[in-house]
Amino acid sequence: MTDRGGGSAPAGQPVLRIRDLVVEFDTPDGVVRAVDGVSYDVAAGETLGVVGESGCGKTVTVLAVLGLLPRRSARVVRGEALLGGMDLLRLPPRRLRAVRGKRVAMVFQNPMTSLHPALTVRHQIAEALRAHDRGLPRHAARRRAVELLDAVGVADAARRARGYPHQWSGGMRQRAMIAMAIANEPDLLIADEPTTALDVTIQAQVLDLLREVRGRTGAATILITHDLGVIAEMADRVVVVYAGRVVETGDVHTIFHAPRHPYTLGLLAALPRLDTDRQSLAAIPGQPPDLVRRPSGCAFHPRCGLHRGRNRCVAQSPDLATVGPGHRAACHYADELAAETARAAGMSAAEPGDGPGAPA
Amino acid sequence: MTGRYVGRRLLQVLPTVAGIVLVGFLLIHLAPGGPIIALAGDSGDEEYYAFMTAKFGLDRPLPEQLATYAGNVLRGDLGVSYIQGRPAIDVIAERLPATLLLAGTALVGSSVAGVALGAWAAARAHSIRDLAVTSAALVLYAAPVFWLGQLALLTLALRTGLFPVQGMTTAGGPETGLAWALDVARHLALPALVLASQEVAAVARLTRAGVLEELAADHVRTALAKGLSDRRVLVRHALRRALLPVVTVIGSRPGHLLAGTIVVEVVFGWPGLSRLLLTSVQTRDTPILLGIFLLVAATVVLANLVTDLVYGWLDPRIRYR
């Protein structure tokens, strides 16, 4: 076993590179292009925050990478997902299975339903170990499972591990999910809305744990969330997704202080704040787009304050263009936002490191 | 899953069985006719009728007859067959093994095959092979047992001679040892297959639906994300949950199976309980009828108990409630 102090790849090196991923679903209403040319990297030791409204394709992207999309209705149209030298999207099932849970592990949103209700917690963690180490005896796997639970802060782990998920609280179950995910010391940990289903006080604990795990294992982390508060607290870099496309990406400080996409700005303005006397929340007008009938040009234009009836937004889809060091945005009029953000900064932008997601 | 739980469930068995004995007793006596006509014939000899009636205690008031019968049952005495003149319990015990063998084989075989087929079909849902299995199950489920039985007789027994046509053993054949067992197995094959066919269909369809639902569940996605094989996820994770409703259905089958055996036993000349039951109904042989009632009731109640215990094993949340 190699030294995992800094993950298997040196810090700063991309662990996973997603390139031009396109995923389509067959639905009764027609074909939905849920992911439309998404590209991003995540490096060892780094936490990449992926933000967007529900249904924007942020989860579908990672499920596609792991081959966990529903087989009948979903298909990867094109793209690459490079882990080391391997393209996970073209790996034969048997080899992809060796990657899942071993090199790339995932923590899902709802710990209440993501564990098997009729198997003990210990068994479910031991299963993850034995799936990738055929020679590991059952009793050794069980012992290791208890150690893992202990490491993620489950009190009295040896006794509790013999219990069933229904005897565990939501926060404890999410700890068990995290223990399961780090069981095989993965190079990449994907956490999909890991705190959304939890109480606010438990959310902070789980985020602390994720941060601690990252520090200990040096794994790359993809944190998927719709909660900018979580992003501010956890992420090094941010990818903002809208209607299946990356609309802005940059380091967390830049995204919060100098966004160059009106959607990002809208998300920031919608953050509830305790330090202003604003009475109502600023919502982005309109609805997330119906992906069967995607708006022409820039998908955000029907809801965009910057559009102002200009034809270019309707006619032409903007490419992701560099707007600053390590900062890219997909807006025809990104320049105009510089002035807007300067005006809005005082009342809307949250500081990275402000604390956990503000209560809704 | 404590001993106390099992004990409590067993205590509930007593009033259930007692109720069934009471209802069965009253129903038989409410029906017109009686064993005397069957025994003494249509001669019209009133004196002889009265003699026979008194001999079996049928001249006593009904509550008294009931009390006597209940007391005897509690002592393990099911009475004497009016027709055969032998203890009812002996008559029933003679026929019981054949029926248990037939119904038991059908129940176990159909459960195992049904679950396996259902899970297999769910794993390749909506494919041609799934469609074939699902449609075949539907046809089998819709086919009446007597028709299936005669069809099997015509094609597999009479036409090809692969299987014997009637009975449980070959007349003058081996009576002990392996040769005897093989002879019985050859006789058993067709009736058991026919009896199991409907069960297989029901169990397979239910299993398939349950597994399909479970395969879309969050915990299955977690299991796949851990790197478990499709097969392990199907059998250890999805199927385990999907079995809950299947176990309920299988647990309710012993009662139905005994009813289904009547037809199959008649078609295949199987020397089991069902034909005894038929003749006993015709002759109003009350001790035999009530004995069989008691047996069926006990079987159903016992099957329910076993179902509950299996439930607790499949879903620990039930155990801890």
Image (cartoon, coloured by chain):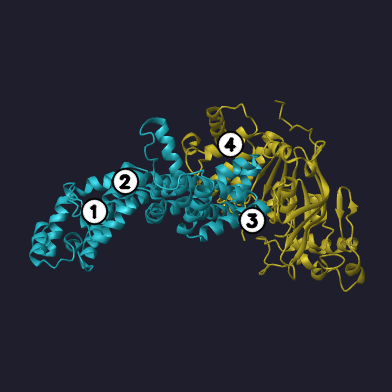
Q: Chain of mark 2?
A: B
Tell me how far mark 2 sits from mark 3, CA to CA. 39 Å
Amino acid type assigned to the residue bearing label 4 in the image? Glu
**Chain B, colour shown:** cyan
Tell me how far mark 4 sits from mark 3, CA to CA. 33 Å
Q: Are marks 1 and 2 in contact (CB under 8 Å)?
A: no
Instruction: Say which quadrant the C terminus of chain A sits in.
Output: bottom right
Query: Could you classify mark 1 by the number of other residues whose Cα lies within 10 Å: few (under 14), some (14-19), or many (20 or more)?
Result: many
At mark 2, the secondary structure is helix
Q: Is residue A7 above or below residue B164?
A: above
Tell me how far mark 1 sits from mark 3, CA to CA. 47 Å
Q: Chain of mark 1?
A: B
Residue B114 at least partly seen: no
Residue B117 at least partly seen: yes
Query: Could you classify mark 3 by the number of other residues whose Cα lies within 10 Å: few (under 14), some (14-19), or many (20 or more)?
Result: some
Residue at point 37%, 51% (across, down): B304
At mark 3, the secondary structure is helix
Q: Nearer the viewer, mark 4 or mark 3?
A: 3
Q: Position of residue B111 (x, y in %)?
A: 48, 47
Q: Position of residue B168 (x, y in %)?
A: 39, 43
Kindly indicate which chain is depicted in yellow in the rendered structure.
Answer: A
To which residue does mark 1 refer? B288
Q: Are the residues flagged by discs 4 and 1 from a single subunit?
A: no
Q: Are the residues flagged by discs 2 and 4 from a single subunit?
A: no
Q: Are the residues flagged by discs 1 and 3 from a single subunit?
A: yes
At mark 1, the secondary structure is helix
Amino acid type assigned to the residue bearing label 1 in the image? Ile
